[in-house]
Amino acid sequence: MREGINLLESASPTMISEMARQCWNEMDSNQSIVITAHRSPDGDAVGAALGFHHHLKAMGLTTSVVLPDRFPSFLNWMPEADGICFYDEETESATQLLHAADVIWCLDFNGLDRVGKMEEALREAPGRKWVVDHHQLPDDFADCLLSDPTCGSTCELLVDLIVGWGQGELLTHDAMACFYVGIMTDTGSFRFPSVTAHTHAVLAHFMSRGLEHASIHQKTFDEQSLNRVQLQGFAMSQRLHVFNDYGLAIVGLERADLNRFHYESGDTEGLVNKVLGLAGVGVAIMAREAEPGLIKLSLRSAGDFSVRDLAAAEFGGGGHKNAAGGVVKGMSMPQFIEFVSTRLSDWFNAGV
């Protein structure tokens, strides 16, 4: 087996600040350490939280993972996922963990409002808040901040941080598996422009140390429920709206559609990328009716069109240039589709 790649010699896009490096020296085995991430956690959030938990545990520290709510079931296989404390299910226990923590690692979010109903408990927690994130314009709540919006995932940033601590060769198999999930999912299986030579250097380092990447892909993507497959097929065949003149397409799923296929969290994951993959489509929107009068959006784009700017201007959201999210309030799905059709000219001809 080849020796691991020296990540410090690869073309890392991230300069680890001295302050971030010092975080290691400020932790010890007598401290209570909590790791958390944003609400509706995706692969990067879960991978970052669990991967960092595995690494710190291997280094002799005691950590707890507290998340605002559950993640899609296709991530349940991840090592020690069953040990996570979910705020919406165990509010008292989660609050106690947050308030007793000496250090709270806040991963993959740039503002306290991104943790949903857990915001007040996190805001009032007296421990130091150390943030690792790759979203733009972080709020001023971190005692220590490692932020790089050009990086494809928070998991990649965490690997840089661990390497900056001189511990790159000490990453465990479980930690690498979790970090791989985050990098894989937040880069669209390594096809987004945010993927760099350094990204691949990180993955090569994992593989050189024995990580079986194929099994991670299989467990994450290839063990789907029949309901999920049928829902996504129905969405693409019956709920797809394509505006050819603008290269934009929308899939809009109402509550009745979701109920018909016994929707569970994560069943629409990846659907927006399927829409974006259609020939001639450069901007894709996946709209899901979460409740009457509330539609949640996932937006993706290819090229120069910024769905982050669109989400911020029209849908109270944000994210990255080519991947963003938002919400629509007070509209039914047909009303939303009609709204989009009336705004296309402004979005594409005059900018949002």
Image: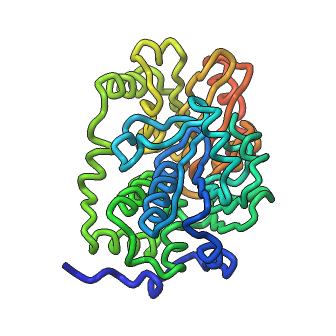
Q: In front here: 199 or 280? A: 199
In the image, residue 187 sits, relative to residue 119, either above or below, namely below
Q: In front here: 213 or 95? A: 95
Which x, y percent locates residue 113?
Answer: 74, 43
> Which coloring applies here?
rainbow
Residue at 58 percent across and 76 percent down: it is 14
Q: As drawn, is 224 to the left or to the right of 120?
A: left
In the image, residue 186 sits, relative to residue 41, either above or below, namely below
Q: Is residue 245 visible?
A: no
Residue furthest to the bottom in view is 9
In the image, residue 249 sits, relative to residue 4, either above or below, namely above
Rendered image quadrant of residue 174? bottom left
In the image, residue 25 sits, relative to residue 214, either above or below, namely below
Which x, y percent locates residue 163?
Answer: 48, 78
Q: In front here: 246 or 103? A: 103
Residue at 30 percent across and 33 percent down: it is 224
Q: Is residue 341 visible?
A: yes
Residue furthest to the front in view is 30
Q: In front here: 216 or 286? A: 216
Q: As drawn, is 127 to the left or to the right of 90?
A: right
Residue at 67 percent across and 62 percent down: it is 130
Q: As drawn, is 2 to the left or to the right of 301?
A: left
